[in-house]
Image (spheres, grey):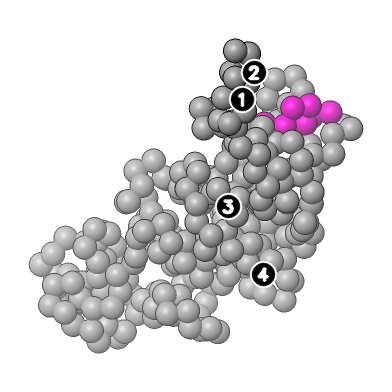
Amino acid sequence: MIFILSLIISSMTNILKTEAIVLNKINYGDTSKIVNLFTKDTGKVSVIIKGGRDSKSKIGKITDPLNYLQIIYYQKDTREIQLLTEADLLLFFHNIKSDIDRLSYASATLELFIKLIPENEYNLRLFKGLLKILGLLDDVTTSPIDLFCSFLMFFIKEIGYEIQLENCVICGEATLNNLSLGYNYEKGIFCNSCKKNNFFETNIQTELFNYLISLKTNKKNYETNTKVKEDAIKFMEKFLKYHFTDFKELQSLRLK
């Protein structure tokens, strides 16, 4: 009977090997750590590292936010926090961690996953996208704000939403690049004429509209000033806030 029970319990627990990016970590109890990961094969997962706060713990040392790991953990559907048993460091993004501007945008990227991605929701494109932006941010020749704006537009689409910019949702007007526009976060964009008689949350001037279009169409090397890029981030934050009532803002960017 004991043998049969042991087999049943064993069958309910899976040993999984995958790649993961560390989102955040907290101390737990006197000796352990709880780490939030975004994994290649199982999405966002919370794991515990028993004894992870011990200075001799190899796993505890390498599970820092932004680190890219190969891990083995025990997955049990009946518990919310899984058991991490092995981890090896694959990449350490040194340049991000030594540059406050790059670190701010990288932290904001992780914050999107922490706040907006549910547990255990598999998304390989998001995993690859996260790994790619961290690699690009680690390249000191790149522009952190440009990378983050592009990723934010990509992220919004990947989680099932899309910023409608192609034509006025009221009259269908498609030539919008030289107009003062309005945006309704539920319906989409209004041309200059239609916004006069319809409710919208925010104005979009020509330069911001053109930059958002460049992000959505993945147009490389679109030139604009930093203020427009910051306005684009704020616009996309408000878009997320409308669709996710618990989301307020990306705090990492407010610490810059």
Q: Which residues are magenta?
A: 48-54
User: Residue most toward the left?
Assistant: 197
Say which amino acid is labelled 2. Phe
Q: Residue at x 67, y 74 (%)?
A: 142
Front-most of 28 and 119? 119
Depth check, mark 2 against mark 3: the one in front is 2
- Point out residue 89 in the picture as x, y percentages from the top left corner: 79, 51
Near mark 4 (Cα within 10 A), the count class, few <14, some 14-19 or many ≥20, is some
Q: Which residue is mark 3?
A: 41
Give the spatial CA distance, label 4 vs label 1: 46 Å
* Neighbourhood count class around disc 3 (C-alpha, 10 Å): few under 14, some 14–19, many 20 upward: some
Image coordinates of residue 106 in percent, x first then y, are: 63, 57
Mark number displayed over residue 3? 2
Look at mark 1 in the image and give the residue it sits on.
7
Provide the residue designation for mark 4.
136
Q: Main secondary structure of the magenta part?
A: loop
Q: CA distance from mark 3 to mark 4?
A: 22 Å
User: Is the Cβ of the residue at disc 2 closer than 8 Å to that at disc 3?
Assistant: no
Residue 7, image x, y percentages: 61, 25
Question: Answer yes or no: do the residues labelled 4 and 1 have beta carbons within 8 Å?
Answer: no
Question: Of label 3 and label 1, which has the lower sequence position?
Answer: 1
